[in-house]
Image (spheres, helix red, strand yellow):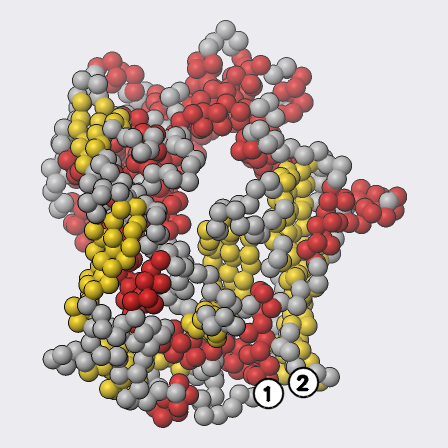
């Protein structure tokens, strides 16, 4: 016992060297609570708009960390709000942020100034650069960076296409005449980039500057483009190639129709890279310009290539099979050229799964599992053969899900207005430069904003396969057999996979896998005309008598209730009794009594408000968002941090731990170590915190601190410490606590026969935490809900949960004790940041939480 206490004391001394933030006036502490914000001086926008933008901005969520410097946080609010007003057209805005100690509020005082709209574009210093073409790139929709010219329309306009040859989605104008001007730095950067592209399309790469200038009338601003050195049109002086071990320099230049002395104009980079990519001979290809010489007029074109080892040289023709596969690739990667809807089906004994992706209509799926009851229905009613256990559809007209088993309900929404975004799912195959893994599967999901009012299906499925993959396909897997008979190319592999493609058109006949995975005998991919409409009609016919649980008046609440009740709880319909089944049965029973209504209402009331007008105050992207690989990860982190404020009480350990885990996963964990140290030595944490923190830090950032958490948790296994943790998690000020109390109220009001029948509480010999919880909860009718809740939780702790927690903490302690080496310990122990000790608890607090010996 003494040795364990000695280790605990030593590690506590180590952790005391990290920073604590409690009570430090120089830290943010609870000033980062968005409820403390008071926004004043707004005229152009409701103050709720500005407050909403502040509360959801990732940069401010990170700067509002309780351990962050307070001055930095207040400055960040001023800078971000000012950036928002600059982005909305207010160049003279002034923002002052100050703290009112008396009211415990953070006041954001705004002086908006006049709002400017976009006026004319003025180009100065140009000689050969066409002003008309340059201005057109700025005030009209323009092609994206990776697009290229695909031809000329009958009216003489350039036709831009993307990498797959589909019409490119044009980007919005950056300078919208008569609309509010973007004065923020990000907007100026975009204007500069587009101006450079506009002049490069004419063959010039000049020295220039872009500036937005408010006019004296106080209402309009001009966009000034000053060209200091127009220079001459770009002429290639040299062409250098790297990575061409197989293909000769002359063959590459001849293929690209390039030679020194020629001029470059248009989107030359996209055109060169696309041509190399489409050849199927290269895994990677990059083209870039280098300007050298005293006057910068010596231009070098660099081509950096990674050749496909399985492809022939550029000077050698593709084989007949490779040519067919390249045509197949051209078609399958262009949904607009599909001969029908894509149908993927998987079947096995007694089950069938089917998914349909339609470029015009949307995406649907259905699942069927045969049962005896279904077989009886099939005999009695021929239409029953079309009945599916589960079906879902997402289209421009409707979206929903239907479940026929066990009782048949559906959640179906008829679309009344176009959706603002479209989800695009990508699946692709790539060649790599790795010998061990020559191919890679690429999966992706992105959202694409749609023009307001534009009707479009909300989901699109795309294949994205490199031509180099299909050119190399004959050599990728050993034992493959290829034949061309009756106008059909057929590839057979030893893995029971067969691909059949029409030789003349490149259209897919079928792609089949036999015994692809356990329980399934066949996986098949084909194109079928009007498959989406046919399958949707069958779903609607067989499910038309299912009650629709969607409530237009309460869409979020009805969806949440449906998925909890049907897709989660109804899945666990088993006669065998074990703990997860009992718990799910209990939750299902309380959720059927509308427990989610109060939860959703609470979420709606706590959410930061804001108007839904199109001219809504928004903040431009910050450097924090731009540091992520994509905007969706930044958005998820922002929503997660904001959700912690709703679910738990701020500054409690559940709130802190949930936030720190998200920040560590996002590699934004500047204060995670100090927060772990502060909480670990706190008298306000118990075994649940120690176990949760040890598991989280053990998975995300293994270190000596995890070892301390395990030791500390093993010292806090008393019921008093456990109850303290439970009271912190279930504080009634947070949604988690309110939800728990709502569940308690419903369980205590149930009729005895309801409880006995649903939960089988008569199983006296069974040691069940769920049964223990419910019996204790209902044993003292005169207790308040709070008293009954924590008595029941304590009973669960002493009846077996304590032993389980002790077992898990012991495993973590033993694993970490062996895994942490002396160098790691020395690094951790030598980190002297002088963390002050927490204030010692009062005598009453000590008496309440001291372990019983």
Q: Quadrant of residue 302?
A: bottom left
The residue at which mark 1 appears reads as 320
Real-space CA distance between mark 2 and mark 1, rounded to the nearest whole angstrom: 9 Å
Q: Residue lying furthest front in this view?
A: 217
Give residue 726's quadrant in the image: top left
Towards the viewer: 124 or 679 = 124
Let me know if residue 543 appears in the view: yes
Looking at the image, which is closer to me, 608 or 703? 608
Q: Give the percent coordinates (x, y) of residue 137.
A: 35, 63
Image coordinates for residue 190, horizontal then vertical, percent: 29, 57
Which of disc 1 and disc 2 is earlier in sequence? 1
| Of the pair 353 and 697, the residue shown nearer to us | 353
Question: Residue 377 bears which disc, if any?
Answer: none
Residue drawn at x 65%, y 19% is 754
- Give the residue number, with chain letter if any, for mark 2: 484
Q: x, y percentage for residue 53?
A: 33, 37
Tag 2, which secondary structure? strand
Position of 509 with respect to 562 (left or right) is: right
Question: How crowded is the residue under tag 1: few (<14 C-alpha within 10 Å), some, or many (20+)?
Answer: few
Residue 653, horizontal then vertical, whole percent: 31, 31
Q: For the residues labelled 2 and 1, say whether their Cβ atoms are less than 8 Å apart.
A: yes
Query: Which quarter of the rendered picture does the N terminus lie within?
Result: top left
Task: Please tell me whether residue 316 is drawn above or below residue 719 in the rendered image.
Answer: below
Q: Is residue 797 left or right of residue 52?
A: right
Work out whether 439 lies above or below 657.
Answer: below
Residue farthest to the right? Answer: 380
Nearer-the-camera pick, 401 or 474? 401
- Residue 718 shows up from this direction: no
Measuring 22% from the left and 58% from the top, which residue is drawn there? 224
Q: Secondary structure at mark 1?
A: helix
């Amino acid at each position: 016992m003494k040795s364990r206490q000695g280790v605990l004391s030593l590690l506590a001394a180590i952790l005391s060297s990290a920073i604590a933030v409690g009570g430090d006036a120089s830290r943010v502490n609870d000033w980062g609570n968005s409820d403390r914000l008071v926004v004043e001086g707004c005229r152009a926008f409701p103050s709720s708009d500005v407050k909403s933008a502040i509360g959801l901005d990732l940069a401010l969520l990170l700067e509002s960390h309780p351990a962050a410097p307070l001055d930095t946080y207040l400055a960040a609010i001023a800078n971000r709000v000012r950036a928002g007003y600059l982005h909305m057209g207010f160049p003279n805005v002034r923002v002052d942020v100050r703290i009112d100690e008396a009211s415990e509020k953070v006041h954001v005082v705004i002086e908006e100034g006049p709002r400017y709209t976009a006026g004319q574009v003025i180009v100065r210093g140009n000689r050969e650069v066409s002003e008309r073409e340059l201005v057109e790139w700025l005030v009209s929709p323009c092609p994206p960076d990776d697009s290229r010219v695909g031809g000329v329309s009958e009216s003489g306009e350039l036709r831009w296409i993307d990498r797959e040859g589909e019409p490119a989605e044009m980007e919005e104008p950056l300078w919208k005449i008569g609309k509010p001007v973007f004065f923020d730095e990000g907007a100026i950067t975009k204007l500069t980039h587009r101006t450079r592209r506009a002049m490069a399309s004419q063959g010039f790469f000049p020295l220039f500057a872009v500036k937005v200038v408010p006019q004296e009338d106080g209402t309009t601003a001009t966009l000034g483009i000053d060209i200091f050195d127009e220079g001459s049109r770009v002429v290639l002086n040299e062409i250098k190639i790297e990575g061409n071990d197989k293909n000769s320099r002359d063959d590459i230049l001849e293929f690209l129709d390039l030679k020194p002395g020629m001029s470059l104009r248009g989107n030359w980079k996209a055109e060169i890279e696309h041509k190399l990519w489409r050849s199927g001979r290269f895994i990677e290809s990059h083209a870039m310009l280098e300007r050298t010489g005293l006057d910068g007029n010596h231009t070098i074109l660099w081509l950096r290539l990674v050749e496909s080892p399985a492809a022939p040289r550029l000077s050698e023709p593709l084989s007949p099979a490779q040519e067919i596969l390249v045509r197949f690739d051209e078609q399958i990667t262009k949904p607009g050229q599909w001969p029908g809807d894509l149908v993927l089906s998987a079947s096995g004994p007694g089950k069938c799964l089917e998914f349909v992706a339609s470029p015009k209509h949307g995406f649907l799926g259905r699942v069927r599992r045969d049962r005896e009851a279904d077989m009886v229905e099939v005999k009695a009613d021929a239409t029953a053969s079309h009945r599916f256990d589960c079906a879902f559809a997402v289209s421009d007209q409707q979206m929903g899900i239907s479940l026929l088993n066990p009782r048949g309900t559906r959640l179906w929404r008829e679309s009344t207005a176009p959706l603002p975004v479209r989800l695009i799912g990508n699946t692709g195959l790539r060649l790599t430069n790795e010998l061990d893994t020559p191919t890679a599967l690429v999966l992706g999901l992105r959202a694409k904003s749609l023009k307001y009012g534009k009707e479009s299906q909300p989901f699109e499925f795309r294949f994205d396969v490199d031509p180099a993959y299909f050119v190399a396909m004959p050599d990728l897997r050993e034992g493959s057999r290829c034949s061309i008979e009756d106008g059909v190319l057929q590839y057979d592999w030893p893995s029971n996979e067969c691909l059949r493609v029409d030789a003349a058109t490149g259209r897919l006949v079928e792609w089949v896998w036999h015994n692809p995975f356990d329980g399934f005998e066949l996986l098949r991919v084909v194109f079928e005309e009007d498959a989406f409409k046919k399958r949707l009609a069958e779903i609607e016919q067989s499910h038309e008598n299912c009650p629709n649980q969607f409530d237009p008046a309460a869409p979020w609440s009805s969806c949440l209730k449906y998925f909890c009740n049907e897709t989660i709880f109804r899945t666990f319909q088993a006669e065998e009794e074990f703990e997860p089944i009992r718990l799910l049965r209990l939750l299902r029973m309380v959720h059927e009594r509308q427990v989610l209504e109060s939860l959703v209402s609470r979420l709606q009331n706590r959410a930061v408000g804001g108007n839904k007008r199109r001219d809504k105050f928004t903040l431009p992207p910050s450097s924090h968002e731009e540091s992520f690989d994509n905007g969706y990860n930044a958005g998820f982190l922002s929503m997660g941090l904001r959700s912690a404020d709703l679910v738990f009480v701020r500054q409690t350990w559940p709130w802190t731990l949930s936030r720190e885990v998200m920040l560590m996963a996002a590699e934004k964990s500047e204060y995670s170590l100090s927060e772990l140290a502060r909480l670990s030595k706190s008298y306000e944490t118990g075994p649940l915190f120690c176990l949760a923190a040890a598991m989280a830090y053990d998975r995300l950032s293994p270190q000596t601190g995890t070892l301390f958490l395990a030791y500390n948790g093993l010292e806090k296994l008393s019921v008093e410490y456990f109850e303290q943790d439970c009271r912190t998690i279930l504080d009634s000020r947070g949604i988690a606590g309110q939800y728990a109390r709502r569940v308690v109220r419903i369980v205590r009001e149930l009729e005895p026969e309801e409880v006995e029948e649903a939960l089988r509480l008569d199983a006296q010999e069974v040691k069940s935490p769920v049964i223990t919880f419910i019996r204790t909860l209902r044993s003292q009718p005169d207790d308040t809900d709070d008293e009954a809740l924590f008595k029941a939780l304590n009973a669960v702790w002493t009846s077996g949960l304590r032993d389980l927690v002790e077992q898990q903490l012991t495993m973590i302690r033993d694993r970490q004790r062996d895994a942490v080496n002396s160098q790691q310990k020395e690094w951790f122990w030598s980190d002297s940041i002088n963390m002050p000790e927490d204030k010692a608890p009062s005598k009453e607090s000590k008496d309440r939480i001291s372990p019983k010996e």
